[in-house]
């Protein structure tokens, strides 16, 4: 009986050896998460486990939903979920919101100006002394920078984040792009209904053109193209005043088309 069973046992062993190895179970596959925050340096927790400061890459996570918690002193706690897929590095970015009573605890950030070659620079209306190409420390929040040139000026609004450098391009337009600083009443040039003012936003539809501007801002979108005027749109006594060159361009284009 032993001799009769031996060939059968040997054949079974050979079949087992020739069979391919079973593929790893799909549920054992893992993925990862790349987490960035603004400002950087926030504490990151995944499913209740601390993983370090942002930016951070956390790999070999089981597939499925994972809870991310982001904390930083002076900022509101952020908590959300990320779906991890096998073999995929998910990416998520978090903008933190300053706490209601944390303004005094927030560290400063920096402003780095680009494109400034000449002229006088003002930060929030205060002249900037020293090298304009250095990093300029500022408190977190909204700010305004102005480049004053002979006969013109250029203003940009920007925001500073703690422990973060904000880059601002303050390059004046070419000489051929300089605009007149004179403003004139819109009603003297444009018919009623061709322009609307909603809050600070101004929309003009006239002569086949679309102009989008804002009260107090010198940058105007003319048929989608940016144009900077030295004179910014204003509302005085309930009337809308627009850069004279803009009004003349709109009306002259309409006249030439007739």
Image: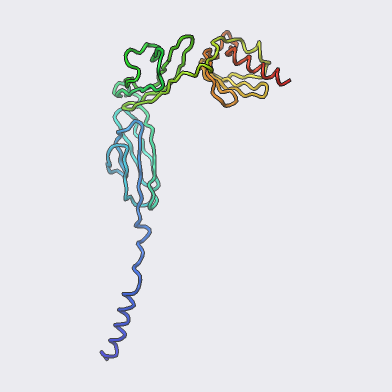
Left or right: where does residue 177 sit relative to residue 139? right
Q: Where is residue 5 shown, x and y percent of the image?
A: 29, 87
Q: Is residue 82 above or below residue 217?
A: below
In the picture, the quarter occupied by the N terminus is: bottom left
Check the image and name the residue furthest to the right: 258
Image quadrant of residue 106? top left
Q: Residue at x 30, y 21 (%)?
A: 104
Q: Where is residue 82 shown, x and y percent of the image?
A: 39, 44
Q: Nearer the viewer, residue 238 or 226?
A: 226
Image quadrant of residue 102? top left
Check the image and name the residue furthest to the top: 237
Q: Nearer the viewer, residue 50 or 214?
A: 214
Q: Is residue 43 above or below residue 246?
A: below
Q: Is residue 95 above or below residue 258?
A: below
Q: Nearer the viewer, residue 142 or 131?
A: 131
In the picture, the quarter occupied by the C terminus is: top right
Q: Nearer the viewer, residue 236 or 223?
A: 223
Image quadrant of residue 145? top left
Q: Where is residue 226 shown, x and y percent of the image?
A: 54, 23
């Amino acid at each position: 009986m032993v001799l009769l069973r031996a060939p059968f046992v040997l054949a079974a062993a050979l079949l087992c050896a020739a069979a391919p190895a079973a593929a790893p179970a799909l549920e054992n596959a893992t993925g990862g998460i790349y987490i960035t925050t603004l400002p950087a340096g926030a504490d990151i927790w995944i499913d209740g486990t601390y993983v370090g400061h942002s930016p951070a890459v956390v790999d070999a996570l089981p597939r499925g939903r994972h809870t991310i918690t982001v904390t930083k002193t002076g900022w509101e706690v952020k908590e959300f979920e990320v779906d991890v897929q096998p073999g995929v590095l998910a990416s998520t970015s978090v903008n933190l919101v300053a706490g209601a009573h944390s303004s005094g605890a927030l560290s400063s950030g920096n402003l780095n100006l680009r494109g400034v070659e000449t002229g006088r620079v003002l930060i929030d209306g205060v002249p900037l002394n020293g090298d304009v190409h250095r990093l300029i420390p500022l408190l977190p929040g909204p700010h305004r920078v102005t480049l004053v040139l002979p006969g013109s000026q250029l203003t940009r609004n920007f925001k500073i984040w703690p422990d973060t450098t904000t880059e601002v391009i303050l390059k004046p337009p070419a000489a051929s792009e300089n605009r007149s600083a004179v403003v004139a009443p819109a009603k003297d040039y444009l018919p009623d209904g061709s322009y609307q003012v909603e809050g600070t936003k101004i929309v003009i539809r006239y002569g086949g053109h679309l102009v989008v501007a804002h009260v107090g801002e010198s940058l105007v979108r003319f048929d989608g193209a940016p144009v900077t005027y030295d004179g910014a749109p204003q509302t005085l006594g309930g009337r809308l005043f627009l850069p004279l060159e803009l009004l003349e361009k709109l009306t002259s284009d309409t006249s030439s088309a007739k």
